Image (spheres, grey):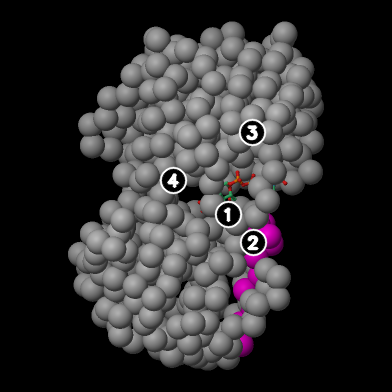
Amino acid sequence: MEKIVIDGKHTLSGKITIGGAKNSTVALIPAALLADGVSTIKNVPNITDRDALFDIVKELDCEIVQKGKEIKIDTKNLTNKTISQELSVRLRASYYFMGVLLGKYKHVEIYFPGGCNIGQRPIDLHLKGFKAMGAKVTKNKHKYMLDAEELHGANINLTFASVGATINIMYAASLANGVTTINNAAKEVEIINVADYLNKMGAKVAGAGTSTIVIEGVKKLHGTDIEVIPDRIEAGTYILMGALLGDNLVVDGIIPEHNKALFDKLSEMGVKFTLGRRSVTINRCKNLKPVNVTTEVYPGFPTDLGQPMSVLLTQANGTCIMEETIFENRVGHYPYLQKMGANIELNGSVATIHGKSKLIGTDINATDLRGGSALILAGLIAEGTTTIRDIDYILRGYENIIHKLSSVGAKIRLEEI
Ligand code: EPU
């Protein structure tokens, strides 16, 4: 087991290159199983959630060949087995095999998914969608069983614009008979990436990126290639580091409009940055104005950046409110920020953050992926040494984070516990 050790207060300058989006990757790898034949997925990030998906795909007898950031998945021997509990609980995105296998075989048995402990995270909307298409869903203590004699198109109204439910329904609907309409669909850019992949496979998906997605089912899908879009959350995390410690820090390989909500907030706080076509150059702001931030579905301020953002707010000159509205328990990092010296009152998912606080390095624990990256951010600006344990959460979704930060001047390292 390892821990992350950070000596704080070092300036960040140079260039960080952003990898492929975790939340696209974890949907695109399962989607490859919808196709008959070989799919190529490019720009796949080196994260442990990817490795967990590789293990599931192999468990289902598909072949995976990886060359750097490019993977090829061959489905010729695909078998519709029950994905083992050990693999299902390794990540949230194991739930995408539900839509894929239901679409392809009309039968799935799958253990409950895992993922970060940031709320209850029910999957009732996924199941409601499958049921509307004709699937019978049964559940025992650990597993879901889904069966359909035939999957048919349906008109599905999501009561919340869930990313996972939108994608899962797109998968099953792509191989259903007839037309499925998803109303109040999620609009996250990762959904467009997934829809592009499905359409290149021969699916007929229209409207991705809007709140109405229409899918006309087809009989078969074929192997093709797709490139994972840049990770706007990884990018946002480094951009926030730049706002605190940057000396012309360049965050490269991004699609700036995907981070518009973050850039708008940074401008409001007085942070100076220059946007390029695929990059941003950002400098430390010594006089941060206080702001209030509420997380929202895309294109609002992303929930996945709420925790890292809260660290920036500890350095504003005045009181800020950070409100998380998507997940009810995305607050595990706050006690550790308080331990480091931040002045924060937490009331449910609303944090009142009084700045500017001096943070002091100490021993802390990552409680989830984005909470973990928030603690790295805190360690980078703290005086002295910060030690972070339970770092597996962080490695789930940030590729080569130690190397990327070291290469721009951070004093950060892994140590054996
Ligand atoms: N929800 C329901 N019922 C459902 C589905 C969702 O009540 O059937 C609720 C959830 O409990 C949550 C809210 O709706 O309160 C949003 O959930 P959503 O389905 O949109 O999120 P998700 O599919 O579980 C994905 C990402 C998350 C990211 C969210 C929102 C994956 C594997 N996970 O989760 O990523 O925060 O969308 O953008 O793609 C992360 O990267 O740190 C992360 C948690």
Q: Which disc is residue 22 wearing? A: 4
Comparing marks 1 and 3, which lies closer to the viewer? 3
- Give the x, y percent position of residue 177: 69, 11
User: Which numbered disc flags the more N-terminal residue, 3 or 2?
Assistant: 3
- Residue named by callout 1: 117
**What amino acid does circle 3 point to?**
His
Comparing marks 1 and 4, which lies closer to the viewer? 1
Q: Secondary structure at mark 4?
A: helix
Comparing marks 3 and 4, which lies closer to the viewer? 3
Quadrant occupied by the C terminus: bottom left
Distance (Cα) linking label 1 and label 3 = 17 Å
Q: Secondary structure at mark 3?
A: loop
Identify which residue is drawn at 69% across, 16% down.
147
**What amino acid does circle 4 point to?**
Lys
User: Which numbered disc flags the more N-terminal residue, 1 or 2?
Assistant: 1
**What amino acid does circle 2 point to?**
Asn
